[in-house]
């Protein structure tokens, strides 16, 4: 047997002293981990249509408190904390928060009781003058279908999580890339846009552009532009049925092929014009969406903007793809060679991108998009 070294003995002794020094103190989750836990709780609650409460204690601006005061605040929150709750730093040195999961959305009495117990616990441990330096708020996160509220109010919890200092910088860089690239591409592609417009106009009667309401970020509706690829007054019943089957996981009657793959567009759609088939195959019909990007309604990279009747059939967890990222012209699933797969897999790829978007990720996806379009895997 290997002899017990003195170094190992000192390490164990140090560990024991550390545990002894911290024994009895409340467990506080660090900021980065706590935000991860909070996002996971939000996603879990949304997936199952549940609610949770977030208790937030924030040091007001231009105020200062020492470590002993924070220790008193932590003890106060720990006094009302349940075994299932999570206490941690939302913003270290400035904001403490506690997650109370699985709370009924309409349980106002529970929330009043929690707020009252927090105030009493603080009053027992912190004097009045110091308490006035802190603001105590309760936030109840409740799953709401985006279209039910008109989609104009972003989730304050999600927006605050996303708009941390690092998140604001990422968003600014991504927007700068969108504006610069979309403006430049519109200028360079102007002759091509003119040629396509003439071909569309000559191929069949009707407008050059097709305008359609789509569901954007936070469920807000916007009008998406495309070159018209269908005959005017085409009935959308066939597409509604196709989308319904796709979301339910059934094999869409308008899509299958000899390969058994599940495309995201109807194969041999009788509503599409001859010129429209070419535009769709090459994705040139989507070039006008650069204007949507320039207006800030879309991004170059992001989830594809869904139709209203598509979103109405979403499962609770599907809604995250319109709540957590701005829609884009291309995206991760288009360039992953998996654009001919299940709807759930497409949503998972969208959510993977939304979890950590960045200008550098966008550049890599944009570089990979032309090859995906030429191979036919990204023509969606």
Image (spheres, rainbow, N blue to C red):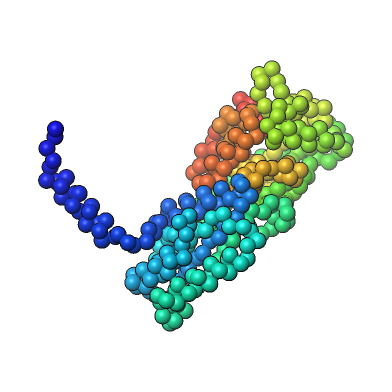
In-front residue for pair 247/18: 18
- At a point 42% along the width and 64% down the height, the residue shown is 78
Q: Nearer the viewer, residue 139 or 164?
A: 139
The residue lying at 73 percent from left, 32 percent from top is 245
The image position of residue 243, as x and y in percent, is 74, 35
- Residue 200 image offset from top left, x and y in percent: 80, 34
The x and y percentages for residue 141 are 59, 58
Q: Is residue 261 left or right of residue 68?
A: right
Quadrant holding the C terminus = top right
Q: Residue at x 62, y 57 (%)?
A: 104
Vertical arrangement, residue 282 with respect to residue 50, above or below? above
Residue at the image point whose x is 61% and y is 47% from the top = 48
> Is there any visible trace of residue 34 in the rendered image?
yes
Up the image or down, 191 lies above or below 52; here it is: above
Snapshot quadrant of residue 314: top right
Residue 370 visible in the snapshot: no
Q: Please provide percent x and percent y for residue 324.
A: 59, 49
Query: Is residue 202 left or right of 321 when viewed as pictured?
Result: right
Q: Disc count in the image?
A: 0
Q: Residue furthest bottom?
A: 129
Q: Quadrant of the N terminus?
A: top left
């Amino acid at each position: 047997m290997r002899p017990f070294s003195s170094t190992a003995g000192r390490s164990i002794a140090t560990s024991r002293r550390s545990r002894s020094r911290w024994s009895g103190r409340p467990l506080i989750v660090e900021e980065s981990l706590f935000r991860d836990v909070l996002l996971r709780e939000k996603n879990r609650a949304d997936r199952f249509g549940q609610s949770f409460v977030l208790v937030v204690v924030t040091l007001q601006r231009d105020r200062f408190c020492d470590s002993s005061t924070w220790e008193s605040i932590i003890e106060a929150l720990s006094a009302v904390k349940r075994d299932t709750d999570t206490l941690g730093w939302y913003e270290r040195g400035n904001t403490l928060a506690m997650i109370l999961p699985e709370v009924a959305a309409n349980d106002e009495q529970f929330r009043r009781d929690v707020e009252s117990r927090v105030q009493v616990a603080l009053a027992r441990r912190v004097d009045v003058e110091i308490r006035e330096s802190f603001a105590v708020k309760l936030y109840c996160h409740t799953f709401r279908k985006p279209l039910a509220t008109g989609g104009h109010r972003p989730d304050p919890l999600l927006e605050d999580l996303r708009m941390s200092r690092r998140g604001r910088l990422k968003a600014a860089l991504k927007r700068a890339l969108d504006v610069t690239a979309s403006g430049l591409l519109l200028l360079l592609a102007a002759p091509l846009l003119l040629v396509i417009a003439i071909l569309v106009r000559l191929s069949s009667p009707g407008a050059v552009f097709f305008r359609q309401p789509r569901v954007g970020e936070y469920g807000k509706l916007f009008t998406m532009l495309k070159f018209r690829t269908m005959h005017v007054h085409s009935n959308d019943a066939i597409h509604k049925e196709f989308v319904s089957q796709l979301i339910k996981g059934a094999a869409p009657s308008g899509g299958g092929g000899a390969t058994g793959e599940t495309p995201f567009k109807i194969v041999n759609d009788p509503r599409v014009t001859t010129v429209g088939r070419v535009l769709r195959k090459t994705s040139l019909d989507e070039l006008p969406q650069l204007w949507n990007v320039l207006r800030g309604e879309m991004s170059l990279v992001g989830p594809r903007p869904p139709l209203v009747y598509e979103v109405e059939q979403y499962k609770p967890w599907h809604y995250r793809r319109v709540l957590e990222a701005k829609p884009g012209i291309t995206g991760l699933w288009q360039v992953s060679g998996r654009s001919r797969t299940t709807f759930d897999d497409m949503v998972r790829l969208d959510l993977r991108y939304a979890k950590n978007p960045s200008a550098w990720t966008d550049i890599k996806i944009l570089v990979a998009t032309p090859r995906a379009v030429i191979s036919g895997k990204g023509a969606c």
